[in-house]
Amino acid sequence: MVNKITRKLYFSAWDIISCLRGVYYKKKKIPLPLIHPEIVKIRENYARVAEAGRLIQQKLRRKWMADHVLLAAENKIPNDWDLWCKFDALCKVNGKLILYEIKGVGEDFFERVRKTGEPRKDNRIQLIIYHHFLRQKYPDLKPVLLYVNRKDPDQTLEIAIEYSDDEVEEIHQTVLMLKEGIEKEMPPEPTGNIIIDPYEKRYLVNPVAITCEYHGLCTGDDYWYPKAIEEIERLNEGK
């Protein structure tokens, strides 16, 4: 029996780009399932990567402050979607207002972005959310994803983001759907174990499933991860 939600529901921007079924379970305060040891190791590595990303952000903000271009950093963004949002940096560069979302990434992904000019979808959605609310106060604000090579933080890539009002509405509908599902006890569809890498066209374990603490509930199997690895090896044969 799930616990009913009586208080007002708030979500983070990260909730909206992660596993919605996992967010549902989290808001319902469902007990966590067992986690396979290999996933524990992967998440520990993710935590180290996240810490490296925070250090990169701090270094950049110190530099921007010294260059007198940083206007604000890590501020909460007021909004009417009941979202908890906090942007990385708001700068004024050569007379232009820029909203930076900073992402430290591995060298392979950095080179991929350099070649394709395509950001990660979840990074893009996160920045759209922040910019949508801030542009009401700063109509000339330019949204930019700033990718930093963790191996060589002096290497950076700026990806300017453009989006439509239809995209904003689609994201808003996701928020409303998640809220309604939690209130009416209608869980979203679970995420899949396996996806195809859009660049290399090979199968891999879905990162959203790995990062979701509740994925074992959706599969009904505490050993879903090693089974997914075996399935991926079979699917990738001959590719």
Image (spheres, rainbow, N blue to C red):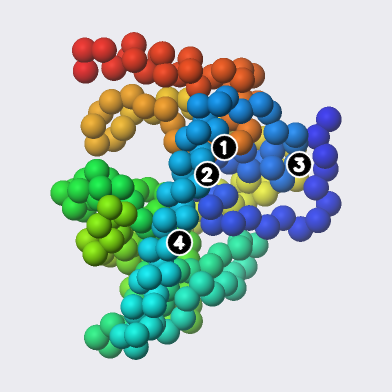
Q: Earlier in the sequence, mark 1 or mark 3?
A: 3
Discs 1, 2 touching: Cβ within 8 Å = yes
Q: Earlier in the sequence, mark 1 or mark 4?
A: 4
Q: Is residue 39 left or right of residue 121?
A: right
Q: Badge 4 is on which residue?
A: 54
User: Residue at coordinates 75% horizontally, 36% vertically from top-left?
Assistant: 30
Q: Badge 1 is on which residue?
A: 212
Pinpoint residue 25: horizontal percent, then vertical percent.
69, 38
- Using the image, tell me which numbered label, if any, was put on residue 29: 3
Q: Is residue 131 visible?
A: no
Q: Earlier in the sequence, mark 2 or mark 3?
A: 2
User: Residue at coordinates 57% horizontally, 72% vertically from top-left?
Assistant: 76
Q: Nearer the viewer, residue 169 or 95?
A: 95
Pinpoint residue 100: horizontal percent, then vertical percent.
37, 69
- Of circles 2 and 4, the one toward us is 4
Q: Earlier in the sequence, mark 1 or mark 2?
A: 2
Separation (CA) of disc 4 from disc 3: 28 Å
Discs 1, 3 touching: Cβ within 8 Å = no
Residue type, numbered disc 1: Cys
Residue 186 lies in quadrant: top right
Q: Badge 2 is on which residue?
A: 18
Residue type, numbered disc 4: Arg
Q: Quadrant of the N terminus?
A: top right
Pinpoint residue 118: horizontal percent, then vertical percent.
25, 50
Discs 4, 3 touching: Cβ within 8 Å = no
Separation (CA) of disc 2 from disc 3: 17 Å
Discs 1, 4 touching: Cβ within 8 Å = no
Separation (CA) of disc 1 from disc 4: 21 Å
Residue type, numbered disc 2: Ser
Residue 20 lies in quadrant: top right
Pinpoint residue 108: horizontal percent, then vertical percent.
24, 43
Q: Nearer the viewer, residue 189 or 150?
A: 150
